[in-house]
């Protein structure tokens, strides 16, 4: 699937552990580079490109020091939203929407992804191109690949980066990005670039570093490849009527409307399409009807918090209201607690997924099934109280 190719994010989302080797010596690193050559040659990378890419390259200790979890997986969703969807960022997003209206309309016509959604990705990933990363991509990826004893994760991304250099889409000195090799205004890893980057401004290069039209269109193409449907929104922020039956959490938009669900901004719900109820803070907190396009967003980054931030940010750019319902203030499950809940639900044949301590769609579905069977409020929200309930049964 597409999300597995966003290598670092997918690895973190699945709870992978990046086991570091002992400090790498210069001789060990050069051996690693030379052992990489046959694989690069098989991808039609020339020896000249290969040698130029690695000339003077040494392992970067700063990259190894920054191996850690991403914020969108470790922080509560409401804290992540506060940082990702700030007032200043909303204002800049609206200014970019006005400035680039013609380009955004052309991209939407080509790929079916609305402009506010593209701007939300662009804003969150690189602050609308202002913070695209300064670290040399080849050095960062080579450091990570060697630290994993030539494991496939970063090794494959490194080979993809060499392909990009071979195609002359970017000069080696301009190929910069994050500490983990995510590049340019889109923060694509090299494999995602090869698959989804496009030349939208017509200059003959797929330039996600310096061309906003290319960056925005590349995001749109990525989402289209991930299954984005132009006939659906990403989701809708909603209010629920009193005594709403949370056990009936999936259905057509029209069904939800008949049951008294209303959009937060007062507009009518879409007349067609299927949605499911998402309560990221449990019953009483903000509520959303999410669609298949929410999963397309998760193909970019598998975190629910990230996907929700993109969706809500796009709504705010388009003039939508802030969320009104309060977020929970009680105790949260930590990673160990979530892992224990996953194991407890799996033992009851309710959960099928990794025991990674990460709340996502599979755990949400399992929690709901358990809550329904136990006669509990079926909000799909994992809490310490729910874990104790599972342990006691």
Image: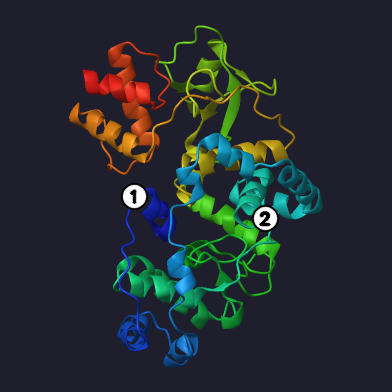
73 relative to 173 in the view: left or right = left
Judge by depth and name the residue closer to the eye, 15 or 61. 61
Say whether residue 230 is visible: no
Give residue 193's position: percent from left, percent from top.
51, 65
Judge by depth and name the residue closer to the eye, 213 or 75. 75
For this orientation, the residue located farthest to the top is 243
Q: Secondary structure at mark 2?
A: loop
234 relative to 266 in the view: left or right = left
Residue 90, located in which quarter of the rendered image?
A: top right
Give residue 6's position: percent from left, percent from top.
44, 58
Q: Is residue 126 above or below residue 26?
A: above
Q: Marks 2 and 1: CB-CB under 8 Å? A: no
106 relative to 346 in the view: left or right = right
Q: Residues within 10 Å of mark 1 (few under 14, many from 20)?
A: some
Q: Secondary structure at mark 1?
A: loop
Pointer 2 residue: 127
Residue positioned 36% across, 21% down in the render: 385
Q: Earlier in the sequence, mark 2 or mark 1?
A: 1
């Amino acid at each position: 699937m597409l999300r597995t190719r966003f290598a670092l994010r997918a690895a973190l989302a699945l709870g992978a552990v990046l086991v570091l080797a002992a400090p790498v010596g210069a001789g060990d690193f050069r051996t690693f580079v030379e052992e990489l050559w046959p694989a690069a040659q098989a991808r039609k990378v020339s020896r000249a490109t290969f040698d130029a890419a690695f000339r003077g390259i040494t392992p970067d200790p700063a990259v190894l020091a920054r191996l850690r979890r991403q914020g969108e997986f470790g922080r509560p969703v409401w804290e992540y939203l506060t940082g990702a969807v700030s007032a200043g960022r909303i204002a800049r997003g609206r200014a970019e929407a006005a400035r680039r209206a013609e380009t955004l309309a052309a991209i939407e016509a080509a790929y079916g992804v609305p402009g506010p959604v593209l701007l939300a990705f662009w804003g969150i990933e690189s602050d609308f191109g202002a913070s695209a990363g300064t670290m040399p991509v080849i050095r960062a990826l080579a450091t990570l690949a060697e630290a994993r004893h030539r494991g496939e994760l970063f090794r494959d991304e490194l080979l993809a980066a060499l392909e990009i250099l071979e195609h002359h889409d970017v000069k080696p000195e301009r190929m910069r990005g994050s500490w983990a090799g995510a590049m340019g205004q889109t923060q694509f890893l090299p494999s995602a670039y090869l698959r989804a980057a496009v030349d939208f401004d017509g200059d003959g290069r797929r330039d996600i570093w310096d061309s906003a039209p290319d960056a925005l269109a590349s995001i749109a193409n990525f989402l289209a490849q991930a299954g984005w449907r132009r006939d659906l929104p990403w989701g809708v922020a909603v209010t629920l009527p009193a005594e709403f039956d949370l056990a009936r959490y999936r259905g057509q938009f029209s069904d939800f409307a008949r049951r008294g669900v209303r959009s937060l901004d007062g507009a009518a719900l879409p007349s067609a399409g299927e949605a499911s109820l998402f309560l990221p803070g449990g019953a009483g907190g903000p509520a959303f009807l999410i669609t298949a396009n929410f999963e397309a967003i998760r193909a970019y980054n598998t975190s629910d918090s990230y996907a929700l931030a993109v969706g809500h940010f796009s709504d705010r750019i388009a003039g939508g209201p802030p969320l009104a319902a309060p977020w929970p203030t009680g105790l949260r499950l930590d990673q160990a607690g979530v892992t224990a809940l996953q194991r407890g639900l799996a033992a009851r044949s309710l959960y099928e997924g990794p025991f990674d301590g990460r709340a996502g769609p599979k755990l949400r579905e399992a929690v709901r099934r358990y809550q329904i069977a136990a006669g509990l409020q079926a909000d799909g929200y994992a809490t310490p109280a729910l874990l104790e309930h599972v342990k006691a049964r």
